Amino acid sequence: MTTTAYGIQLAIVRKDAKRHIVYGWAYVAKDVNGLQVIDHSDELVAIEDLETAIHGFMKSSRASGIGHDGQDHGGAVVECVVFTKEKLEAMGLEPGSVPFGAWIGVEISDATYARVESGELTMFSIEGTADRVAA
């Protein structure tokens, strides 16, 4: 497995002001060049494990927070797709056209959306738990 020695910022990349939905990458396992991404916690997640984790998260929680503070700020994931090699092929997308990762849309409260619009909040935080497994 090839690894990269950098983290990745998961910024909000699209905003829908009418519906107060923000969009972007919740997690990227491999970049568009196929290189494994090491996240800000110095961890890496295989795309298969990410897909399983996202399925569990979507079934049980869908909660979005602010800065991983563990608080319920009234946000919820309303849209999600985990891009895998198989899904890219099924969609007719070329390998390398998008990273292997989870793309989400999060509906947020009026107050939180105002903080996004002001530039104070620029990144995603979903609220879930995971078991850390040594490689």
Image (cartoon, rainbow, N blue to C red):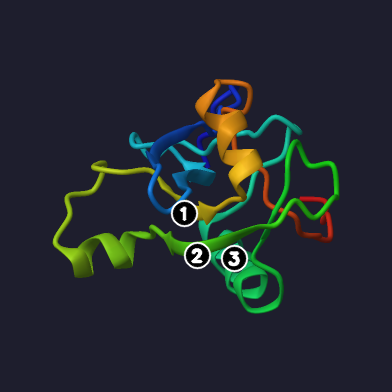
Query: Residue under circle 1?
Result: 105
Q: What residue type is labelled 1?
A: Gly
Point out the frontmost of discs 2 and 3.
2
> Which of pointers 1 and 3 lies earlier in the amino acid sequence?
3
Give the structural element (helix, strand or loop) at label 1.
Answer: strand
Mark 1 neighbour density, 10 Å: few (under 14) some (14–19) many (20 or more):
many
Query: Residue under circle 3?
Result: 54
Point out the frontmost of discs 1 and 3.
1
> Left or right: 120 with respect to 20?
right
Q: Against 100, is 39 above or below?
A: above
Q: Residue at x 58, y 22 (%)?
A: 6
Q: Which residue is drawn at 62% across and 30% down?
A: 115
> Which of pointers 2 and 1 lies earlier in the amino acid sequence?
2
Q: Which residue is drawn at 56% across and 61% down?
A: 77
Give the structural element (helix, strand or loop) at label 3.
Answer: helix
Query: Residue under circle 2?
Result: 78
Asked if the residue at tag 1 contacts the one at tag 2, i.e. Cβ–Cβ closer than 8 Å, the answer is: yes
